[in-house]
Amino acid sequence: MLIYTERERVAWLTLNRPERRNAINSALARAITDAMLRAEHSEDVDVVVLTGSGSAFCAGLDLVELGSSGGNMSPRGTADGPWTPGGGVWFPMTKPVIAAVNGVAVTGGLELVLHCDIVVAAHSARFGDTHARVGVFPGGGMIPLLQRAIGSRAALAMSLSGNFIDADAALRLGLAVAVVPDAELIEAAQRLARDIASADQVLVRGVLAAYHQTADIGGLGDALAAEGKAARLRHSNTDLGVVAQRRAQIIERGRSQKSGRDNEH
């Protein structure tokens, strides 16, 4: 369910559940964490690229598992710290991580994107936070990371409405650094990764660490921990049966929004 390859100093992590639009179940969450840590500790890797197979980057937490066992909502790691979607802890990395986003990156999928350092989007990319519609409190970094990426007002509009933004809007808001045709996404990510890998890696990792540290001056670490604490409290009172019932509604709403935009053009 996750393909890991290394080439030209770049580790490629490809989410590989295309039949489920790469939705995150417990096993995939663990696989993401393990692969990130593998890349982190590999002497042959300077840059990591995360992407998805098929027509989607990641449709978020697997709502089938979430609505039954809820196992992919359970955190791994410390009691007071943050966790990434499905319980995998790997942020921050000392090596830069590029998200190459094809198709939808929704809720937990968007949180994966936000934990990456740089985002390259295909024309088909769409980003959304549907936590408020699914009925699950954010716990994978959405609240502090989304507003840092696009500003608090735009982040609130996304999180409170559950509405999607397209690739061009993501570029305007600063979430993505480039938008390319779908057929050119991997090449564009590879080119950027190669450019980074060709630089002085002591300086690259030093600059990346400085970016992480100076961003945290405003309290990112504390903000992530606060969100995690709030999520644990909310999750303990979440009705997983209701979450399962809302799955079809969320999927249909996403389709109708896309259909409406297609008709506008």
Image (spheres, rainbow, N blue to C red):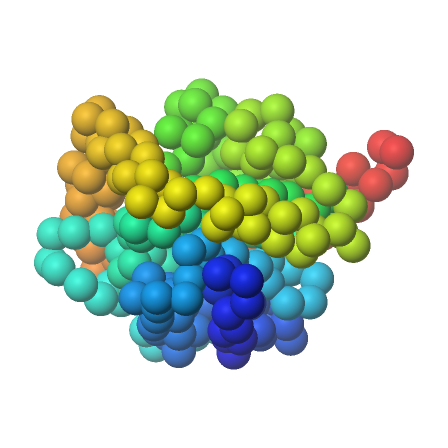
What residue appears at the point 27 percent right and 33 percent down from the top-left corner? 210
In the visual, does 59 lie left or right of 53?
Answer: left
In the visual, does 145 lie left or right of 228?
Answer: right
Residue 151 image offset from top left, x and y in percent: 43, 23
Which image quarter: residue 61?
bottom left
What residue appears at the point 64 percent right and 60 percent down from the top-left corner? 56
Residue 44 image offset from top left, x and y in percent: 41, 66
In this view of the protein, which residue sits in the foreground, 217 or 223?
Answer: 217
Residue 134 image offset from top left, x and y in percent: 46, 53
What residue appears at the point 52 percent right and 34 percent down from the top-left corner? 175
Residue 124 image offset from top left, x and y in percent: 73, 48
Count all numbered tags in the image, as a single digit.
Answer: 0
In this view of the protein, which residue sits in the foreground, 205 or 134?
Answer: 205
Asked if residue 17 can be seen in this view, the reply is yes
In this view of the protein, which residue sits in the foreground, 24 or 42?
Answer: 42
Asked if residue 212 can be seen in this view, the reply is no
In the visual, does 202 lie left or right of 150?
Answer: left
What residue appears at the point 23 percent right and 34 percent down from the top-left corner? 213
